[in-house]
Each structure stands twice: as structure tokens, then as C-alpha cells.
Image (cartoon, grey):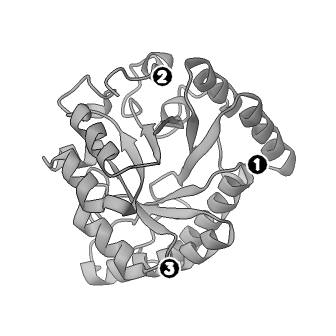
Amino acid sequence: MKLSFNTWVYSSFPVWVPAYPLEETIKRLARIGYDGIEIGAASPHAYPKYLNHERRQFIKQVLDDNGIAVSSMLPAPGGGPGYNPASILPEERQETVQQYREVIELCAQWGGKTVIYLAGWQIFGVSRAQAWDWSRSCLVEVAKIAADHGVTMVVEPQAVDTNLIEGCDDAIQLMEDVGAPNVKLMFDTIHAMYRSEVLTDYVYQMGKNLHHLHLSDNDRLPPGQGRGDFVSLVAALKEIDYQGYLTMEIAFNRRDIEPDKWLVKPTTI
């Protein structure tokens, strides 16, 4: 298992400051000894429309020079130009597919093989069945694009942030409904803990379809600084022969932090 670090805490998501250039973030991860980087496709780091050919080539060179692999990428969740595949607006659903297309292409250009699928949220006036069908249709289309680039889409349950794919069973059901070989599963430990669920249960339920993983303790603390049982989690991952990245997605829920402090590799794993 390899360690990766999500860029949110070094970027402008979910608020503007502080933010660091992507090349600086890559260098800091390399100095600590991380194997990979999970890049959030938001400005100023990696919003596809803001990256010309030269900039993309430069970042690829920085990654190579520092021995850092792109473990995964994901679009920034939220409204705006359109990142809700379950939206009541067909224009937003169409824009979501286009955004995923651009993130997939960028991920592949930088050597990445995994893009996270955020299934969206059901809004007032839309039935769960309809929201589910719209999100499923989006993932079907996106998975075809990803397959052309050798990329796997992973469905993430997000109990804290969404009302559509909240838990393990939801994610498994969406994966099965799509039925594409390059659609797999992931989970973020904070969402499981939000639902007062057991982390190892997710590992065993997802099993061979578990392709990616976000680690954070409660309140987006580093693993081992809250109430999560990460020792048992890693033991379960070894039991199922998990081969993916352990990606830290921590500390970005507030700004009274020093980003480098949270970059230190966790001692509990």
C-alpha cells in the first residue's frame, strides 16, 4: 500500500486562502516522502480550462522530477458551472459530463489512473429514483470516456456532503447498476464515522471492488488523532490484499491550520 495526499489543504477549496502553486505542493509532498498526490481539479491547482499545453507539460515534469505519482483526481464538488449529475437542470447534467471528461483527460496526461465519481445530490422537487437515474446515466457516459483513457472511476459515498450516495450499500448499488468493468468503489473514513459505522465493515463489504481510499479521522484530523480505529482498518486492508493508495484527505475543513503540519506522514499506519 502506498501513501498519497489530497491537495485541498494547499488549494483554494473550499475557500480562497491560503493557496499554494501545484508545483510547490508536489515538492513538499516529495520532501516528506509521500508516494502520490491526489489532485483536486479546482483553481488554482488543476482547473482544466485554466491549463494550457505548456502548463500541463510543466506539471508533468515536476511530478516526474520529484518521483510523485498522480494517485487520483476529482472535481471540486459544489454548484456553480455544474458538478451535480443528479441536477434538475439538463444543462448542469451535461456540464457535469463535460467536466468529468476534462478531468479524466488531464488525469491521464499526468499518468493518473483513477478519477473519483461524486454522485451528486437530490434537490427539492426531484424524487430519489429520478436523481439516482440521472446520476447513473452520467456515470455510464463518463465511464465510457474513462475507459478510452485507461482510467477507473470510483464511486465515493459521501454522507457528510450529499444525500444520494451516503453509505457503502448505496455505492455498491450504483456500481452494479452501471455495470462497467472500470467502475469500482472507494470510501472516505470520515463519512463512515459520520454515520457511526465501522470502518472495517466497508473494507469487507467492498472487497475486491475497493479501488481507492481516503483517510481522515473525525473532524478531518490526521489518522490516529481522533476516535477512528485505523490499526484495525489497515489490518483489514491487508487481509483483502488491497493494492491501492491510502490517501490523506485532511484539515481542509478549516483555515486555522498550518498546512505543512498536517502533511507529516501518519504514524498509526
User: In which quadrant of the rendered image does the C terminus lie?
Assistant: top left
**x 49%, y 74%: residue:** 181
Distance CA(mark 1)–CA(mark 3) = 27 Å
Is 171 situated left or right of 29 in this image? left
N-term-proximal mark, 1 vs 2: 1
Horizontal and vertical percent for residue 56?
78, 46
Instruction: Give the image quarter of residue 189.
Output: top left
Residue positioned 68% across, 72% down in the render: 148
Would residue 185 be found to the left or right of residue 141 on screen?
A: left
Secondary structure beneath dot 1 equals loop
Query: Quadrant of residue 217 in the image?
Result: top left
Amino acid type assigned to the residue bearing label 3 in the image: Val
Q: Residue tagged by mark 2?
A: 263
> Amino acid type of disc 2?
Leu
Disc 2 is placed on an element classified as: helix
Q: Which residue is mark 3?
A: 140
Q: In the rendering, which numbered label is found on residue 73?
A: none
Point out residue 245 in the picture as x, y percentages from the top left corner. Answer: 47, 43
Q: Nearer the viewer, mark 1 or mark 2?
A: 2
| Residue that mark 1 sits on | 51
* Amino acid residing under circle 1: Leu
Q: Nearer the viewer, residue 164 or 105?
A: 105
